Image: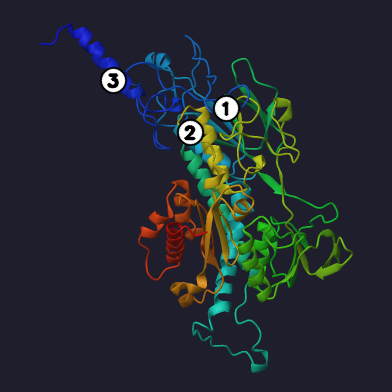
């Protein structure tokens, strides 16, 4: 028979249960098993002891990603208590320490997000799900430039160009006959044409629909959306809060109080002083969707991702394109083998690619545009698209006055959990200059909210980010690059397999592209990859999973693939790397 009183035995059981809660989980999880991101908090307090340890900003970024967070004071007797405006957050909303929860009162954590792009609206969804009171301040429409003027519109335009390219390049080889009554002497003319006005109307319609869907999703989660421009006012108050002043279009102002602020204001097209866009003949990438007619002769200045994508798209739609590149090759920041394939495709399809040619000015002369190069040469066309980079939207927001460090380019400095140098202020997206991708912006925003609101968080790891250039063929990459291997950053084995050997590629008339994988020489762990192919953005995913989960080439080689399929080339590259590892080859 067990000795001791029943109260003592209950105490022992309590001790064992408390030990079970605290075993094996990090401080950010408060001794509980980490929840899946995006799920509602468990109802009620833990069985014993206070609520979870809350992670938040320190006075300055330090080696640890966890530090205490200031919380709003619990209202006293007779003081007004604002009821949460959204369901599922308890009687008063928000997360709470155990003592306040035991009294039935929950302080609301107030989050203000300036900017409604991917970093902003994804952060809003996470913060609302975790019980915060969220306000999103945006001046253009949720989705930001990514949805309204950049990613969604450009990829919609490219989708039309892709259909035309696929048809033009392979219909004869695939045996497709087009009934055409064009006189024989004019048979060299294109069989297929495009109504650019109709294409652009569809582009704008889809972008607005996507923005409305995002707005509905954010408001349905319980966040407030305000139309206007936000700026920080002064420093941090004694209770840790900050003031955000919102200026509406009519000039009226409203001041918001926030326990944490996320800045996700994105960027805008960079302009050359002597090549200012006029919206008609000289354009930036936000203005091309106002064109009703296809440019007959388009000069694209800039051979980075944006320039290459638009140059390829308009060439496919039927414009005569000249691509002006100040570097030795197209896409200087991408894999050199991939860039060489794309440049060869561009030239073969009739594009005039001018390497090592820096544009100095562009001016409109009647219905034409003259672009003057640094060496004095002048090229002319009917239209000119300036794609020379982006500038962060960080000016006029009171950032430096609030203690936020900016880089020389105007970007906001952040650490791996999106903290700035000002306590309680986070940043995400293109305004940080970390990686100009919508997926990275969204992850930065989610990480910021998980961190401030005390949920389990994994710091941003750029070596697991997959990206894609939406040219034809597409170029998708993930992990370490060829430049990293050549520069000695990492030791890796490399195998590249052309798609010409792939049976499905032969069936579809695909002649350009390859699969390349990098793996560690000793373990065979996959550390990076490149895919150049139609729909490379889809094919990169298995390599991305391998990089993120430290899978080996053996594991990829042993997984079944469909025959015939383009993904079969990924397995074949893995098998070649596996055999080289077994034989000790380079």
Residue that badge 1 annotates: 63
- Alpha-carbon neighbours of circle 2 within 10 Å: few (<14), some, or many (≥20)? many
| Precedes in sequence: disc 2 or disc 3 | 3
Q: Position of residue 523 (x, y in %)?
A: 45, 49
Q: Secondary structure at mark 3?
A: helix
Residue that badge 2 annotates: 457
Q: CA distance from mark 2 to mark 3?
A: 25 Å
Q: Residue at x 46, y 60 (%)?
A: 580
Quadrant in which the N terminus is drawn: top left
Residue that badge 3 annotates: 17
**Is disc 1 in contact with disc 3, using a CB cutoff of under 8 Å?**
no
- Alpha-carbon neighbours of circle 1 within 10 Å: few (<14), some, or many (≥20)? few
Q: Nearer the viewer, residue 424 or 109?
A: 424
Task: Let me know if residue 394 appears in the view.
Answer: yes
Q: Position of residue 7 (x, y in %)?
A: 21, 8
Looking at the image, which residue sits at the far left?
Answer: 1
| Precedes in sequence: disc 1 or disc 2 | 1
| Precedes in sequence: disc 1 or disc 3 | 3
Q: CA distance from mark 1 to mark 3?
A: 32 Å
Q: Secondary structure at mark 2?
A: loop
- Alpha-carbon neighbours of circle 3 within 10 Å: few (<14), some, or many (≥20)? few
């Amino acid at each position: 028979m067990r000795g001791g009183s029943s109260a003592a035995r209950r105490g022992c059981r309590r001790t064992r249960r408390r030990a079970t809660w605290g075993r094996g989980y990090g401080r950010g999880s408060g001794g509980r098993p980490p929840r899946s991101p995006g799920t509602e908090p468990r109802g009620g307090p833990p069985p014993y002891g206070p609520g979870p340890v809350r992670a938040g900003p320190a006075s300055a970024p330090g080696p640890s990603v966890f530090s205490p967070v200031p919380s709003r004071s619990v209202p006293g007797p007779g003081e007004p208590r604002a009821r949460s405006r959204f369901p599922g957050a308890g009687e008063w909303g928000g997360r709470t320490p155990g003592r306040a929860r035991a009294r039935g009162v929950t302080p609301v954590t107030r989050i203000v997000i300036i900017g409604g792009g991917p970093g902003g609206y994804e952060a809003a969804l996470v913060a609302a799900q975790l019980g915060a009171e969220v306000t999103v301040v945006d001046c253009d429409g949720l989705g930001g430039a990514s949805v309204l003027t950049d990613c969604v519109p450009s990829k919609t335009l490219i989708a039309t160009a892709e259909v035309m390219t696929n048809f033009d390049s392979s219909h004869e080889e695939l045996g497709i006959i087009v009934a055409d009554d064009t006189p024989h002497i004019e048979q060299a003319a294109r069989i297929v044409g495009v109504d650019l006005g109709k294409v652009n109307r569809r582009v704008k319609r889809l972008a607005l629909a996507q923005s409305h869907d995002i707005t509905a999703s954010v408001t349905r989660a319980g966040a407030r959306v305000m139309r206007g421009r936000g700026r920080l006012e002064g420093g941090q108050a004694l209770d840790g809060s900050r003031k955000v002043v919102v200026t509406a279009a009519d000039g009226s102002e409203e001041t918001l109080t926030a326990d944490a602020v996320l800045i996700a204001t994105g960027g805008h097209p960079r302009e050359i002083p002597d090549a200012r866009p006029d919206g008609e003949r000289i354009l930036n990438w936000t203005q091309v969707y106002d064109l009703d007619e296809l440019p007959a002769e388009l000069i694209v200045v800039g051979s980075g991702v944006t320039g290459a994508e638009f140059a390829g798209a308009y060439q496919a739609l039927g414009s005569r394109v000249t691509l002006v590149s100040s570097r030795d090759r197209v896409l200087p920041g991408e894999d050199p083998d991939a860039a060489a394939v794309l440049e060869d495709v561009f030239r073969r399809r009739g594009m005039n690619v001018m390497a090592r040619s820096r544009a100095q000015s562009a001016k409109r002369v009647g219905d034409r545009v003259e672009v003057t190069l640094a060496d004095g040469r002048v090229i002319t066309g009917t239209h000119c698209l300036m794609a020379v980079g982006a500038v962060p939207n960080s000016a006029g927001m009171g950032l430096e006055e609030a203690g936020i460090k900016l880089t020389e380019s105007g970007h906001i400095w952040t650490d791996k959990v999106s903290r700035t140098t000002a306590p309680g202020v986070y940043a995400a997206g293109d305004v940080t200059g970390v990686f100009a991708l919508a997926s990275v912006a969204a992850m930065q925003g989610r990480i910021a909210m998980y961190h401030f609101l005390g949920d389990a968080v994994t710091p941003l790891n750029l070596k697991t980010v997959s990206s894609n250039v939406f040219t034809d063929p597409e170029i998708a990459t993930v992990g370490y690059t060829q430049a990293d291997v050549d520069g000695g950053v990492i030791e890796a084995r490399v195998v590249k397999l052309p798609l010409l050997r792939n049976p499905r590629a032969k069936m579809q008339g695909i002649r350009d592209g390859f699969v390349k994988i990098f793996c560690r020489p000793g373990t065979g762990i996959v550390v990076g990859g490149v895919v150049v192919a139609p729909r490379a953005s889809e094919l990169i995913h298995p390599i991305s999973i391998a990089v993120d989960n430290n899978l080996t080439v053996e594991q990829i080689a042993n997984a079944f693939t469909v025959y015939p399929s383009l993904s079969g080339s990924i397995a074949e590259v893995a098998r070649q790397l596996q055999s080289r590892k077994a034989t000790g080859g380079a």
